[in-house]
Each structure stands twice: as structure tokens, then as C-alpha cells.
Amino acid sequence: MRSETLLSIAPALREALLRNRFDTDTLLDVLGPEVHSALGRNEPVPVRRASRGHGDLGVLVRLFLLADDCPAADVAAALAPLTLADAMNAGLLEGENFDTEHPLVHAVVDVRPVDVGAGDRWVISDLDGALRPKKATDDHVLGVGHASLSLLQATPTARVGSVLDLGTGCGIQALHAATYADSVTATDINQRAIDLTAATMALNGVEVTLHQGSWFEPVAGNTFDQVVANPPFVVGEGRVHYTYRDSGLDLDGASELMISRSLDYLNPGGTAALLASWVHVEGEDWRSRIASWLPSHGVDAWVVQRDVADPALYVGTWLVDGGQDPRDPGTEGRANAWLDHLEAANVEGVGFGFVFLRRTDTPTDLMAEDLLQGFSDPLGAEALAYFDRVAWLREHDVLQERFVLDSSTALERVYLPGDEGWQQVVTRVHRGDGPHWQHEVDELGAALLAGLRADGLALGELVELLAAAHGENPDDLRDAVVAMIVSLVRHGLVLPVSG
């Protein structure tokens, strides 16, 4: 595929896709929710059946989403005004049986609609081999998967001037950034990724500056309002098998590089949203490992661990991802070498999650925590709100301030059956939106939270009253209350009136 040729057919291909309403809403409507879910599971039969009777749109579904061999005449009609000859010359399609009465064509690349939160875009990537067997090459360009979609949903979308998408891959993060940034720069070490991203941008009529090169080298000396990255963060042996996932750095070196160096490319107050992974080493706290990657001054960091994988599961998952048969002796050797390397480094698990950074001129503040529960609200807006709450805490004495409960905060009491009936075993406050944080509190804490009023007493005065009413030592109670309120403010269950 020559990228300049693929670029040349973008206007005609776009016209065909628009004419046939090849978009996420139409596909969901045509296929129905059950069949659409089957498509997400790479189950082609229900999709083929549902696409019948939908004319040119059904042909595009089978051509681009199922990678089927399709009758050339049907594809020619569906792609008009793009001609079959131009599509094949550009490397969009390949054909066979052209010396027969019924020639067939199939897609060489994956073209699919994606909702980026501000309308549909189309993304071009390499076929993943799930529906049409195809061994991944070392320059394989991954399409829109669960990881890239999770980052898209976790990225702050407040209006900014400039965004850097490092390791752009198929360009999905850059497409997303173009909806909220004045300018977008995207980089990748893989020239094929740059070529396909250029075609994706042309297909969508979006302007993005593209640079080929390793890590931050293509943008040396530049700074941005936001950095977004889904880097090749797979924890491995320091070897590159596939550029989309392997960095060539040992263990979690790719995540360390991104977390430690992103700050140098942020404007003051700028933010970064990164996908990352880190090893859990026997006898060490994973939070301390990440803390060692940050400077002592100049950043607020919020690290959210979404999952921790056993090494054997982790290695097996990534080998299958690369199209390797776990029953093959060569795959077994690769798995053993990988697991031996992790074992030698005392790795007992691999964590995965999001890293949010904001550049400041104050001492570094790091919160690294588990967020294993499900949630539906976008995490990007929560990250910005979290940074604002951290900044507020830094600048205020909480004992002198008034607070209110967030409107979604609920008090929960859990009872279990005991010898004398129901026995209360835990009291907690629960945030009903955002990440659904929960904090256990004691009865004094619950009583204090009940007394928070916008026009009420300052926190220090409430502590004095509570201590007197319950015969508590004011100093001891004050320390406990401050710690509780700071945690609840960080997580948005309690909000300052002066904020």
C-alpha cells in the first residue's frame, strides 16, 4: 500500500460511506443490539445474516467489518463514486477470479466507524486476523480495541490549544483530540502507522500534524497543553516483536519513560492522560514504584489501577493477541522465556490502568489507588475535577472552612444477622456518580458529616462541639476528622463551600 495513493481516494471513499450511512447509529439500527454485540465478539454468521437485504450498506458491512470475499460488482456499486480499479490500485482492496464470470474482492485494511463523542469518524487500520486469518507483521497497525476506547473515554475533553498524541497507532486518540483542541500533533515510530493515520485523517477531513520517530524525539523542544498516549506498554523482556505493543524497554520501562518525561512536554497547568502498566514486585508496594518515576516537585499525579493480572495469564493473553497458537512448540518456548524473565525479576503481578498528570509549580502530590469497581461516567472530567480539588486542599486550612455533602453522596449501613437479630457491621458513605467511591466511617464521622451546612459552622468548630458532646479528646478527634475530610474532598463526596 502506498500512502499517497490511499490519500488520493479518501474524498471518493468518504462520499460512499456518507451515502450509505456507514456510521455507528445506523449499524446498530440495522443489525440490532444482539447482532451488533455478536460483531463485537467477532462472530460473523449473525452479522452476515442481518446484513442481507440492506443493499449497499450490507455490502460495506461484509466487506469492511467481516473482511468477507464479496462479489466485485456489488462492491463497485457500494463504493461509487470510488471506482473498483482506483480502490485496488490504492491498496484498499484485493481481488481474485477476475478471469471468471464472478470475480471477488476483499478489503486489505479495516475501515470502520467509531463514535468519538462528538460525532462519527472512520478509522483505517490493519485487519486483526480475527475474522480473516492473517498473521500480524512487526509493523502491524492495531485497530480500535478495548484499551484505546478506554483511554478515549478517560481523556479530559475541556477545550485546549494543543494536544500531543504520542504513539498514535491508527490515530483514534488524535481524531478524538481534534474535537476539543485547536491543533493536534501525532507521532509514531512505525511509519505504517503514520501512513494509515494520514489516510484516516484525510478520510475524515481532519488536519493533524504527523511525525515519524521514537518517543518524544519528533517533538523535542515543543510543549503542549495536553499529552495523550496509549504507548507500547506491554511488560516484557526488552525485545520488540510487534511495534504496536512492544517498546524494547525492559519490564515496565515504557510506562516509566512516559510518566517521567511527559511533564517536560507540558505547558504550565497542562495535563497528561496515559495508559500504563507496572509490575508488582514481591515485597514492594506498587505505589512506591510509580512514585519513584516522578520528580519531587512540579506535578499532581492521579494513578488509577483498574486491574492486576497474574503473570501466566498476562503472558498467555498477549501471545494469543499476537496470533500465536498456545499449542505450538514455538509459542511454548516464547511463553517460558517470557515467564522466566518475569520470575527472575520477582514479578508477582502486572497492574494496568490510567495515569493522569498536571504540571504545577508546587511540591509533587501523588494519589495511586485501585479503582476496580465498575462505573459509567467519563473519567476524564473526573480527573480535572480531582486536580482542582487537590489544588484547593493545598491552598486552604480545612479546619477554617465550611463544607457540604455532594448531592450524590449517600450514607449506607450494612447489617448482618447475629445472635440477637440484625447487627450493624459497617457504615460507609457512597458517591452515586463518577467512579462511585466508597469510604467507611465510624458513628462520630457520620454524625459530623450530617452537620455539614453551607451556612453552618466551620469544620474546626464542628469538631469542638462533637468532642464535647461525646467526651472525646478534641486534639485526637481533630486529626482524625481532618484526615477523613481530606480523603472525602479528594474523592468528591464532600465539597468546600468556598470552592
Image (tube, helix red, strand yellow):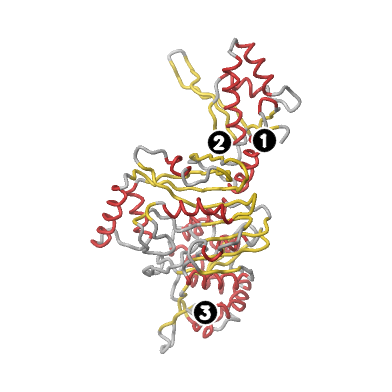
Q: Which mark is residue 395?
A: 1
Question: How far across and down, in percent of the image, does residue 463 sit?
Answer: 64, 19
Q: Residues within 10 Å of mark 1 (few under 14, many from 20)?
A: few
Callout 1 secondary element: helix
The image quadrant that residue 160 belongs to is: bottom right
Amino acid type at circle 2 is: Trp
Answer with mark 2 or mark 1, whichever residue precedes in sequence. 1
Q: Which mark is residue 437?
A: 2
Amino acid type at circle 1 is: Glu
Discs 3/1, front: 1
Q: Is residue 381 left or right of residue 415?
A: right
Amino acid type at circle 3 is: Asp
Q: Which residue does the numbered mark 3 point to in the structure image?
A: 74
Q: Are marks 3 and 1 in contact (CB under 8 Å)?
A: no
Answer with mark 3 or mark 2, whichever residue precedes in sequence. 3
Mark 2 to mark 1 CA distance (whole Å): 24 Å
Callout 3 secondary element: helix
Residue at figure coordinates x 71%, y 23% from the top left: 458
Answer with mark 3 or mark 1, whichever residue precedes in sequence. 3
In the rendered view, tell whether residue 440 sits above or below residue 42: above
Residue sitting nearer the eye, 396 or 12? 396
Residue sitting nearer the eye, 205 or 222? 222
